[in-house]
Image: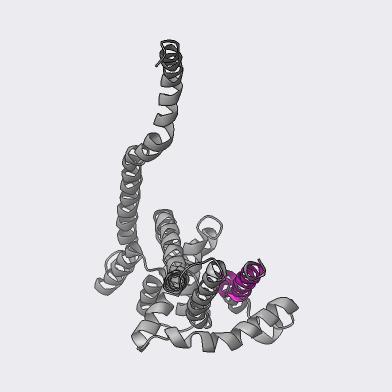
Amino acid sequence: MEVYVIAGLLAVGVAMVIYAVWPKKGDDQEKILRRASGRTRAEDSTESVSGADSAAKEIMSKVAPLAMKPVMPKTEEEMSMISVRLSNAGYRDERAVSWFLASKTIAGLVLAGAAIGLTFNRGISMSTMIGITGIAGAIGFMLPKIWLWMACRTRAEQIRNGLPDSLDLMVISVEAGLGLDAAFMRVGEDMAKVHPALSEELVISTHETQMGLPRGESLRNLATRTGVAEMRSLVSVISQAEKFGTSVARALRNQADAQRIKRRQKAEERAQKTTVKLMVPLVLFIFPVIFLVLGGPAMMKMMATFKEMGY
C-alpha cells in the first residue's frame, strides 16, 4: 500500500512541476504588448512573481538539461522541427524545446516507476513485470508527443476557422486605404477576442515587419508558425500580388471566397459523417435497451409458461 501511495504522490508532484514551469501562451503576448508600449525588461521585472512558480522554474531549469540528454535529437534539423511544432502549438519560449524533451524522459520514468509499484509483490513473474514496465515507460515517453500533436491540431483548426472572417475584414481595410501592414495590425487587434490564435500571429508578423524584417520573410515566418496550408496559400497569393503588381485587395477577396467555400464544404462533410458515427452508440447502447424493453415482458411470460409446463 505504501508503494502505491509513493508512486501516486511522485506522479502528481512531477505533473504539478511540469505544469507550473511550462511556458504559457500568454508569455509571448506579454512580450508583444511590452514592445508595443515601449516598456523595458527592467520595468517588467518589478512585477511580482510568486515564490512557488520561481522555485519550480529553477528546479526544472536544472533538471531539464539532464532529462533531455537521452532523447536529444541527433541533428539540428530534428531540433528545428521540434521547435516549429511547438510554435505551431503556440509555444515559442526559448525553453519550450528543452522542457518538452525533458518531459518525455520524466513521463516515461514516472509511468515506469508507477508500473513497478503496481506490479511489485503481486506474484507476477519477472519477465511479465519487465514487459509491463517497458510498455508503461513507452506510453509515458509518447504522451508528450501525442499532446503536442493534439495541441497543434486544435490551434490549426482555430486559425483555419478564423481565416475567412479575418480576410473579409482585411479586404475592407485595404480597400479603405490602409496599407497591408496596417491592415494586418487592425485585423489582429479587432479579432483578438473572436479568434485569439490568428490575431496573435498577425500581430507578431506586423511587429516583425516594423522591426525591419522584410515583408516577404515575415509572411513566410507567419506561414511556418501557423503550420496551416490555407495560411501558406494566403502568403503565396500576397507575395505574388506584390511581385507582379496586381491588386492585393482583389487577391485577398478571392482568397476569402475560396476559404469560405472550403470551410462550408468541411462543415457539410462533418454533417455527412454524423450518420455513420451514430451507428456505434446506436448498436452498442440504444438497440440493446430497445430489445430489452420490447422483448423483456415476452421472455418473462415465456419463461413462466415453460415453468408451469414443467420444463
Give the main secondary structure, helix, strand or loop, of the magenta stretch: helix
Q: Nearer the viewer, residue 26 or 101?
A: 101
Whether residue 26 appears in magenta in the rendering, the answer is: yes
When asked about the image quadrant of residue 145, the answer is: bottom left
Q: Give the magenta part as a residue range.
A: 5-29
Q: Residue furthest front?
A: 310
What is the number of callouts on the image? 0
When asked about the image quadrant of residue 48, the answer is: bottom right
Residue at image point 67% right, 69% down: 2
Quadrant holding the N terminus: bottom right
Q: Nearer the viewer, residue 164 or 226?
A: 226
In this rendering, position of residue 137 left or right of residue 12 = left
Q: Is residue 92 above or below residue 63?
A: above
Q: Nearer the viewer, residue 160 or 220?
A: 160
Quadrant holding the C terminus: top left
Residue 48 in view here:
no
Residue at image point 44% right, 60% down: 154
Q: What is the x, y in percent for residue 30?
A: 61, 73
Whether residue 161 appears in magenta in the rendering, the answer is: no
Q: Residue furthest left?
A: 244
Residue 273 in view here:
yes
Q: What is the x, y in percent for residue 90?
A: 49, 70
Q: Is residue 289 above or below residue 92?
A: above
Q: What is the x, y in percent for residue 166?
A: 44, 57
Q: What is the x, y in percent for residue 20?
A: 63, 73
Q: Is residue 190 above or below residue 4?
A: above
When asked about the image quadrant of residue 282, the answer is: top left
Q: Is residue 164 above or below residue 132?
A: above
Q: Which scheme is used to colour this image of the protein?
A: one colour
Q: Nearer the viewer, residue 47 or 271?
A: 271
